[in-house]
Image (spheres, grey):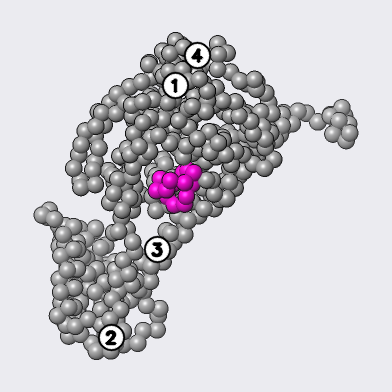
Amino acid sequence: MGTFVGGEGVRTEQSLPNVEKTIGAVAEISEDEAEDRLQETIQEKFAVFGEKEHQAIDILLAEIDIYELFSFKHCKGRKVKLALCEELDERMQDLKNELQAFEGEEYDESHKRKAMEALKRMENWNLFSDIHEDFQNYTVARDTFLSHLGAKLWGSLRHIISPSLADGAFHYYETISFQLFFITQEKVRHIKQLPIDLKSLMDGLSSLVLPSQKVQFSPHMLPLSEDPALAMAFSVARRAAAVPLLLVNGTYRKTVRSYLDSSILQHQLQRLNDHASLKGSHAHSRSTLEVPIFWFIHGDALLVDKHYQAKALSDMVIVVQSEPSSWESHLQCNGQSLLWDLRRPTKAALAAVSEHLAGLLPLHLVYSQAHETAIEDWIWSVGCNPLSVTSQGWHISQFQYDTIARSYILTTLEESIQVVNSAIHLLVMERTCILSCGLCRS
């Protein structure tokens, strides 16, 4: 599940935990099977070396790692001891002698250090014998399991406890006014004649506001044929590009996509807004937030920025609707392409509006401190909501509803801290005197 081109966050059937590799085989294996497992482990380990020349110490250390892993999986705790384990026990004694030989003066310090560290490790092990050990055994299976568990818990915290939000300040307003601009190529007599389920769209937009907020709708119809300035903005922002598409079978196909460049279109629409042709009645209100949604209805297949049906910008939301009902997207799930119905972009529009209002992002998108950028973990693309790529639903979940409220709280808290810090900075620079003390007492 994820993009066709793959990546760190893409999930396949190979992404599921491998119990045998993590914990080891449950059933005891035979001598022949043990020999085969050992040979497989050796081939996997030394395949990493390739054809490059490696130092003798590195080969010895790799051999020790192989025997260690094999011992914990197939020698420890068996009712009937394998003859192969006894042979490996003898080989371990030979390895100790070979490592001790590196103490000579003819070897450099790095080789000596590696050999000493390996000998210390082997002193604490009792891999192939049945002697009782007082100390707690180090087990590869346990540590591997705990490392996977810790990674999953940390990933869950990032996705659930502190979900990612878009960069920016998202303020709380008493009223949210949605300015719906439906832009068609030709004039339409009545808004009910538009190929849009307006009631479902309004219900979806209403679900993005909190109970204490009010919602308003102002639909407008803008035909390009009767608005030369808007037609010019649309024409200037329209682009076509050859986009390589990686198919499920691994082959490439070049497709020509027609799309709107969001940055150019935003600039053109801002110029129209400066002339007050697209301003609403609450454009300068401090208690009401106007959300301009420009909904372009086009005949041919049309996207935003090559890949999207809707895009949230700093001061507006752009949505495109076109005729194709089964458009092959750049995403896949279960080895099949995810098909989009470009005639119904309501789901994509609600996702873009929620990002514009409160910075709400898809659950599979998180910030990576190691990469210092956003990464995708597609296993979290779940649920029947606008932000899930694997479903057709567009209803906001309770978790996302809480995230919207949390976004408003975080913005208010951060700005309050900045105000308090600025006040403290002013007080630090102010000298204490009789007048200032009297002011503080009052």
Residue 125, above or below 200: below
Q: Which residue is mark 4?
A: 271
Q: Earlier in the sequence, mark 1 or mark 4?
A: 1
Closer to us: mark 3 or mark 1? 1
Which mark lies nearer to you, 1 or 4? 1
**How would you rate the neighbour count of disc 2 (Cα within 10 Å): few for under 14, some for 14-19, many for 20 or more?**
few
N-terminal of the two: label 3 or label 1? 3
Residue drawn at 38 percent across, 38 percent down: 341
Under mark 1, the amino acid is: Thr
- The x, y position of residue 263, in whole percent, is 42, 23
Residue type (three-letter) at the residue carrying disc 4: Arg
Spatial separation of the CA atoms under disc 3 and disc 1:
55 Å
- Mark drawn on residue 65: none
Q: What residue is shown at x 56% (from left), y 25% (from top)?
A: 219
Mark in front: 2 vs 4: 4
Q: Earlier in the sequence, mark 3 or mark 4?
A: 3
Name the N-terminal-most of marks 2 and 1.
Answer: 2
Q: Quadrant of residue 112?
A: bottom left
Residue count near mark 4 (Cα–Cα under 10 Å), binned few <14, some 14–19, many ≥20: some
> From the viewer's perspective, is the residue at label 2 or at label 1 nearer?
1
